[in-house]
Amino acid sequence: MDALSTILEAVGLRSVVYSKFPLATPWGLDIVRDENSQFWRLVSGSCTVGSPDGRIIEMAEGDLVFVPHGSAHWIADSATSLRMPSPEFVKARREGTPVFNNGDNKTILIAGHFEFDYQSLHPFLKDLPPVIHIRQYVTENQLLLKQVTQLMLEELNNERPGSSVMLKCLSEIMFVNIIRAYLEQATPDSGFLSALNDPRISKALKLMQDSPQNDWTLESLASEAGMSRSVFFNQFKKLVHETPISYLTNWRIRHAQKLLMTANSNISEIAASVGYQSEAAFNRIFKSKTGQTPAVYRRNKFLK
């Protein structure tokens, strides 16, 4: 499995598509901060976004705006339109109260969010910028986003058996293509996304993630990546923002957290499966990273 796919499984990517919103001009929403990553896809009409980093983004039809960290932002037909707080908008829609439906010029948006297991927050998520603006279809990945949007619209317009599952799967495909399109569009030269784009560093990430039980060393990882020890260390730290061994340790603990919740294995077996032959060493490192021993972590999670 490639490095990004393994990471997305580890962070528990889940998605929700809210609906297709037809909004009559003038309209506007103030989106409050929450823990989810919102996306907005402009199907037709006009749309302006006040991004978390202070920029004003004028969206064209087919554009997508993704707010990875759940930061407060606003979205409206224009920067001067009055805006309704998003909780009020959601409440009105649930109660069947008409909102933003008086007018001829209609904007159609597809909106939703992505959820992650924040107890397993990964450098990949931390390194995403405050906002990602994917412009209308130019590259292959952006054309894939267009196709995904069209399929979403079909499911939203014609609810059929399995539509909710279809929308969930399509939105997860959308997330991967957002990342692919962003890498094509922005070509970041530092941070975790650039590490995924670097064939040698990405190979080392894949090896650690696929086989955390192996006795990896700086030397063995550098050799597998086809780099000298010092060049590998410096390049990895520049892109990932931590050393290879630090990343390996954190990955092992994240994987162990998942196993403690999902596997019937005892703690010594889980320790061995993530590269610790000594249960005492595993307990010590796990507690230093999570604040709890593996046994307490497992017990507390099952009590919730």
Image: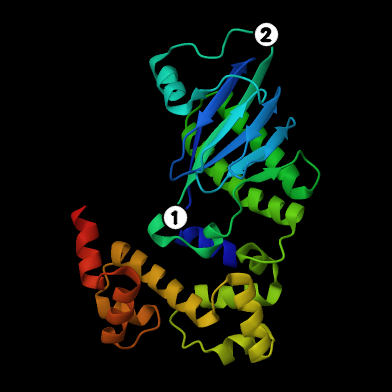
Colour pattern: rainbow
Residue topped by disc 1? 12
Q: Quadrant of residue 232?
A: bottom right
Residue topped by disc 2? 104
**Residue at (59, 55) in percent of width and height:** 128
Q: Quadrant of the N terminus?
A: bottom right
Task: Point out residue 212 in the picture as x, y percentages from the top left corner.
Answer: 46, 78
Q: Quadrant of residue 269?
A: bottom left
Disc ID at residue 34: none
**Residue at (55, 61) in percent of width and height:** 124
| Residue 173 showing in the rendered view | yes
Q: Indicate left or right for 258 with 69 as reference.
A: left
Q: Residue furthest right?
A: 138
231 relative to 255, above or below: below
Task: Point out residue 16 in the picture as x, y percentages from the top left corner.
Answer: 48, 38
Mark pair 1, 2: CA separation:
42 Å
Q: Indicate left or right for 29 with 290 as reference.
A: right
**Residue at (44, 24) in percent of width and height:** 90
Q: Indicate left or right for 123 with 177 as reference.
A: left
**Residue at (63, 15) in percent of width and height:** 26
Q: Alpha-carbon neighbours of circle 2 within 10 Å: few (<14), some, or many (≥20)?
A: few
Task: Point out residue 55 in the picture as x, y percentages from the top left corner.
Answer: 67, 40
Residue nearer the viewer, 96 or 284: 284
The amino acid on which the numbered mark 2 sits, given as a three-letter code, is Asp
| Residue 162 showing in the rendered view | no
